[in-house]
Amino acid sequence: MLKRLFASIAIGVILAVAPFAEPLAVADGGCVGQSWGVTCGVGVGGSNGIGSAVGSANGNGQVACVTQELPPREVPCTDPQLGTWSNPRACYIKLASPQPPQSDPVWKSNTTGAIYECSAAGIWNGPGSYLLWLSSAPGVVPDPAVLAQQAVTQMRLRGVTIGMAPDPAPGSVGLVGLPIWLWVASPDASTWGPNTKTASAGGYSVTATGQVTQVVWGMGDGGTVACASPGTSYSDSFGVSPSPDCGYRYTTQGTYTVTATSYWTINWSGIGQTGVIHRTYSSSVVVTIGELQTVVKG
């Protein structure tokens, strides 16, 4: 009776522990099941245990490359020295060079395919590093920086539409010493932001969000004005009062080319990496500034 009791307890302990000790199942045809909530095949396309990019570790629809720690830790999907990350195997995979001779047991009697290095040592306390045979190369993970540039292209960013008082239209003349009002006319996602776009390739995605941080106005006479806001549109009711946030005064009459240069900061993230892209766009108008003449009659 006592032996049966101990045996029952032992079986119960094994059943309780087994679900936590079971490793990720990998078959020759691909990944099977899940590991700590990480969907099989997330990260790297291909076959023979490499899986395909069909899910994500955090459920947000973006493919992530992760370790099999608890909780999983996101890692870059590519490494210039180690190769391409495989979620099912939790290591970086690249072609072994030189290839072992066909007599090496790692070939498992196969005469096609190739031997690859699976490297995880120093990245996480997982399988370490070893050689394995695969019938075909693992999938290629796109460069996230390239996808980020594609996302920026989708934004269709352009220079601002210049708002200015006095009106830069032909025949309009401003006066020396009077306030010049400067603003971004009808700011939108393409001229001011925020602007968010996502670029995808092979199941991988990178999302970028851009916003203008400042507009620097080159006034054509050597002077500049840096404005962190779009500025305030002028109304006749303002009279000759100065702009509250983006203005200027000319000291000499003349015809000037006014250039508004918008500075964009674009933050991107995806495929285990983040980055920042800076862009500038410019627009110009021509304004005429005259000088008020006083005529004294005797």
Image (cartoon, rainbow, N blue to C red):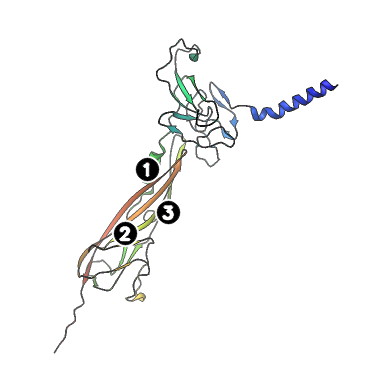
* Secondary structure under the numbered disc 2 in the rendered image: strand
The residues bearing labels 1 and 3 have C-alpha atoms spaced at a distance of: 16 Å
| Residue 259: percent from left, percent from top | 27, 59
| Residue 74: percent from left, percent from top | 51, 37
Point out the tag, 1 or 3, that comes first from the N-terminus: 1
Residue name at image x 35 percent, y 51 percent:
157
Residue bearing the label numbered 2: 216
Count residues near mark 2 (Cα–Cα under 10 Å), then give few for <14, some for 14-19, many for 20+. Answer: some
Q: Is 37 on the left-hand or right-hand side of 62? A: right
Residue type for callout 2: Val
* Secondary structure under the numbered disc 3 in the rendered image: loop
Count residues near mark 3 (Cα–Cα under 10 Å), then give few for <14, some for 14-19, many for 20+. Answer: some
Looking at the figure, which quarter contains the N terminus?
Answer: top right
| Residue 23: percent from left, percent from top | 60, 27
Numbered tag placed on residue 4 in the rendering: none
Numbered tag placed on residue 194 in the rendering: 3
Task: Find out whether the residues at labels 1 and 3 contact each other: C-beta distance under 8 Å.
Answer: no
| Residue 43: percent from left, percent from top | 49, 33
Q: Is residue 45 above or below residue 243?
A: above
Front label number (1 vs 2)? 2
Residue type for callout 3: Pro
Q: Is residue 100 above or below residue 255?
A: above
Point out the tag, 1 or 2, that comes first from the N-terminus: 1
Task: Find out whether the residues at labels 1 and 2 contact each other: C-beta distance under 8 Å.
Answer: no
The residues bearing labels 3 and 2 have C-alpha atoms spaced at a distance of: 18 Å
Residue bearing the label numbered 1: 149
- Return the residue nearer the eye: 177 or 6: 6
- Return the residue nearer the eye: 121 or 199: 121
